[in-house]
C-alpha cells in the first residue's frame, strides 16, 4: 500500500476536496473522531479554530492510502494501516477524519489528523514523516504478501514515469496522462545524441525545445504547457547542457508559443479538429455508460444499506425482547440467566455486524470489477486518441524536414554568391544536390519504417484490449444476479451461527 503524506493548512479547501464527487464516483465518510461535529468540512474547520491558539500554520497531517491495483483490500486492512501510521507518528487518539474514494475502478482512502494537542496547545512533531510512512508501507506489503514495487524496495529502481501531483494536474489541463508525457520526453532523449536530433524527436511527439525562465531547457507542449527537461528525464541540468548546449541559444517559451500559433497550428488545425471530434464521440458514448454504471451502483448500495438497516433494527428488537422485565427479570438476574442472554445478544450483534460488512464488501468488490472492465475500454480509447495525435505530429515534423531538404539550393544562396557559381563550382553544387537527395531518401525510408512499426503496435494493442475486454466480460456478473445472490445469502460463510432465520 503506497502512502503519501503532507503537512498542510487550508481546512475548508481540503474538506471540499475530500467530498468532491466530480472526480470521484463514490465518496464514503468512514470515520469522524474527536470533533464536536460529524461533518467533514466542519471538523477540519474546528481543527483550524483550535490551531489559532498556537503558532502552527500547517495544523493538519493528510495521508492518502493507495492499495495495489490488482488486490481486493478490505476496510479492516485500511484501519490497520491507519492505526500503524498513528502509532509511528505519535498521533494516537488525535482527532481525525477518514474518507474513502472510488474512481476509475480503484478504491483508496484519505486520513487527516489534527496535529494540535488540545491539552498542551502544541503541535505534534512530525520529523522524517516520509521515511516513517515508507517503513509502514513496506511492512504492509510484507504482512499481506503483496508484490512490492521496485521503486519502494530500492529508490534507484523506481519507475521513471512516476509523476507528482503538480505534473498530474498539468497533464490533466491538456487532457493527457502525466506518465505518457514523461515517457515521450524520455524516449526522445534516449534516441538522440545532439540538440538537433533531440529537438526533432520532441517535435515528432508534439513537444518543442525552448529556453525556460527558471529551469534552463524545457519542452513546450503543443497546447502551451511547459515541462522541465531535466526533471522529466531524471538527469542533472549540467548533463543536459553538455548534450544540448547552453539554453541561451534557444528561443524563449513565449517565442516558441508564438511559433506554434503562427507556423504549426494552421497546418494541423483541421486534422486536430477532426481527431478531437472523433475522440469526443467515442468518449461521450463511453462516458454515458460510465455515468449510467455509477448511478446504478449507487442505487445498489443505497438499497443494500436500507435493507441492512431494517434488518439490524428487527434483530435488535428481537434481542431486546429476550430480556424479561419485572419480577421475572429480577429472577433472571438472580439466577444468572440475564447475564447469559446479554452475552449471547452481544455476540450475535457482533456476528450481525460482520455479516453486514461482508455483504457490503462483496457488493463493492463486484462493482469495482465491473468498473475495471469498463476502464479497460476507456484506456483503449485514450490510447488510440494519443496515438492519432502522435502520428499527426510525427508526419508533420518529417514532412517539414523533407520539404526543407528538397528545396533547391539556389534559393538559399544570395545573388552575389549566385554569380560565383556560374563557373566550375557547379560541380560542387551538383554534389550537394546529390547529398540532399540521398538524405531525403533515407528520411523517407525511416518514416515508412516508423509507420509500419506504429501500425504493428496499434494492432497488438487492439488485440490485447479486445482480449482483456472479453475476459472481463466472461468473468463479470450482472447486477441482477449479484443482488439475487446477496438476497439468497450466497456470500462468504459467516463466522457465527446462521442468523437469517
Image (cartoon, rainbow, N blue to C red):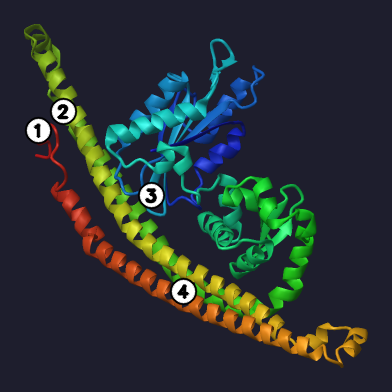
Q: Is residue 394 above or below residue 409?
A: above
- Residue that label 4 marks: 454
Q: Give the x, y percent position of residue 31.
A: 40, 31
- Residue that label 1 marks: 497
The N terminus - image quarter: top left
Q: Which dot marks residue 348?
A: 2
Q: Which dot marks residue 106?
A: 3
State the separation of the CA atoms marked 1 and 2: 8 Å
Q: Which numbered disc, 2 or 4, marks the residue that appears first in the sequence? A: 2
The C terminus - image quarter: top left
Q: How many marks?
A: 4
Q: Give the x, y percent position of residue 214.
A: 75, 47
Q: Which dot marks residue 8?
A: none
Q: Residue at x 77, y 90 (%)?
A: 427
Number of residues whose C-alpha sits closer than 10 Å to that of mark 4, classed few (under 14), some (14–19) or many (20 or more): some
Q: Give the x, y percent position of residue 118.
A: 54, 15
Q: Residue at x 87, y 93 (%)?
A: 422
Q: Nearer the viewer, mark 2 or mark 4?
A: 4
Number of residues whose C-alpha sits closer than 10 Å to that of mark 1, classed few (under 14), some (14–19) or many (20 or more): few
Q: Which numbered disc, 1 or 2, marks the residue that appears first in the sequence? A: 2
Q: Nearer the viewer, mark 4 or mark 1?
A: 4
Are dots 4 and 1 in contact, CB under 8 Å? no
Q: Residue at x 74, y 86 (%)?
A: 407
Amino acid at each position: 500500500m503506497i502512502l503519501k503524506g503532507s503537512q498542510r493548512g487550508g481546512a475548508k479547501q481540503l474538506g471540499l476536496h475530500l467530498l468532491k464527487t466530480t472526480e470521484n464516483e463514490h465518496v464514503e465518510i468512514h470515520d469522524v473522531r474527536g470533533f464536536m461535529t460529524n461533518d467533514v468540512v466542519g471538523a477540519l474547520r474546528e481543527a483550524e479554530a483550535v490551531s489559532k491558539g498556537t503558532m502552527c500554520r500547517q495544523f493538519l497531517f493528510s495521508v492518502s492510502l493507495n492499495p495495489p491495483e490488482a488486490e481486493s483490500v478490505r476496510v479492516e486492512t485500511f484501519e490497520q494501516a491507519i492505526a500503524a501510521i498513528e502509532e509511528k507518528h505519535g498521533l494516537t487518539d488525535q482527532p481525525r477524519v477518514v474518507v474513502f474514494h472510488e474512481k476509475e475502478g480503484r478504491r483508496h482512502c484519505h486520513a487527516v489528523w489534527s496535529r494540535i494537542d488540545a491539552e498542551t496547545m502544541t503541535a505534534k512533531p512530525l520529523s522524517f514523516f516520509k521515511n516513517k510512512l515508507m517503513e509502514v508501507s513496506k511492512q504492509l506489503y510484507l504482512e499481506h504478501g503483496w508484490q512490492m514495487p521496485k521503486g519502494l524496495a530500492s529508490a534507484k529502481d523506481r519507475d521513471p514515469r512516476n509523476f507528482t501531483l503538480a505534473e498530474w494536474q498539468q497533464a490533466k489541463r491538456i487532457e493527457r496522462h502525466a506518465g505518457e508525457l514523461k515517457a515521450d520526453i524520455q524516449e526522445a532523449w534516449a534516441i538522440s545524441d545532439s540538440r538537433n536530433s533531440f529537438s526533432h524527436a520532441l517535435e515528432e511527439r508534439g513537444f518543442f525545445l525552448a529556453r525556460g525562465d527558471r529551469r534552463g531547457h524545457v519542452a513546450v507542449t503543443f497546447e502551451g504547457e511547459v515541462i522541465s527537461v531535466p526533471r522529466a528525464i531524471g538527469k542533472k541540468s549540467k548533463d543536459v547542457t553538455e548534450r544540448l548546449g547552453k539554453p541561451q541559444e534557444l528561443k524563449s517559451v513565449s517565442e516558441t508559443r508564438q511559433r506554434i500559433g503562427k507556423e504549426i497550428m494552421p497546418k494541423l488545425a483541421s486534422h486536430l479538429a477532426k481527431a478531437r471530434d472523433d475522440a469526443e464521440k467515442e468518449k461521450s458514448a463511453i462516458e454515458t455508460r460510465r455515468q449510467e454504471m455509477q448511478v446504478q451502483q449507487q442505487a445498489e448500495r443505497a438499497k443494500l444499506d436500507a435493507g441492512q438497516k431494517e434488518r439490524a433494527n428487527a434483530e435488535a428488537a428481537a434481542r431486546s425482547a429476550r430480556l424479561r422485565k419485572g419480577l421475572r427479570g429480577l429472577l433472571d438476574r438472580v439466577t444468572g440467566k440475564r447475564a447469559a442472554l446479554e452475552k449471547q445478544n452481544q455476540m450475535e450483534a457482533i456476528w450481525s455486524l460482520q455479516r453486514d460488512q461482508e455483504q457490503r464488501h462483496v457488493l463493492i468488490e463486484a462493482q469495482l470489477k465491473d468498473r475495471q472492465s469498463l476502464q479497460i475500454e476507456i484506456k483503449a480509447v485514450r490510447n488510440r486518441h494519443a496515438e492519432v495525435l502522435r502520428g499527426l505530429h510525427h508526419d508533420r515534423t518529417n514532412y517539414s524536414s523533407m520539404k526543407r531538404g528538397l528545396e533547391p539550393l539556389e534559393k538559399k544562396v544570395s545573388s552575389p554568391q549566385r554569380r560565383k557559381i556560374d563557373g566550375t563550382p557547379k560541380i560542387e553544387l551538383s554534389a550537394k544536390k546529390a547529398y540532399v537527395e540521398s538524405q531525403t531518401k533515407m528520411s523517407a525510408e525511416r518514416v515508412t519504417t516508423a509507420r509500419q512499426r506504429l501500425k504493428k503496435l496499434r494492432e497488438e494493442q487492439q488485440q490485447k484490449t479486445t482480449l482483456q475486454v472479453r475476459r472481463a466480460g466472461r468473468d463479470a456478473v450482472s447486477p441482477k444476479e449479484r443482488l439475487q445472490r446477496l438476497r439468497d445469502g450466497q456470500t462468504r460463510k459467516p463466522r457465527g451461527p446462521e442468523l437469517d432465520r
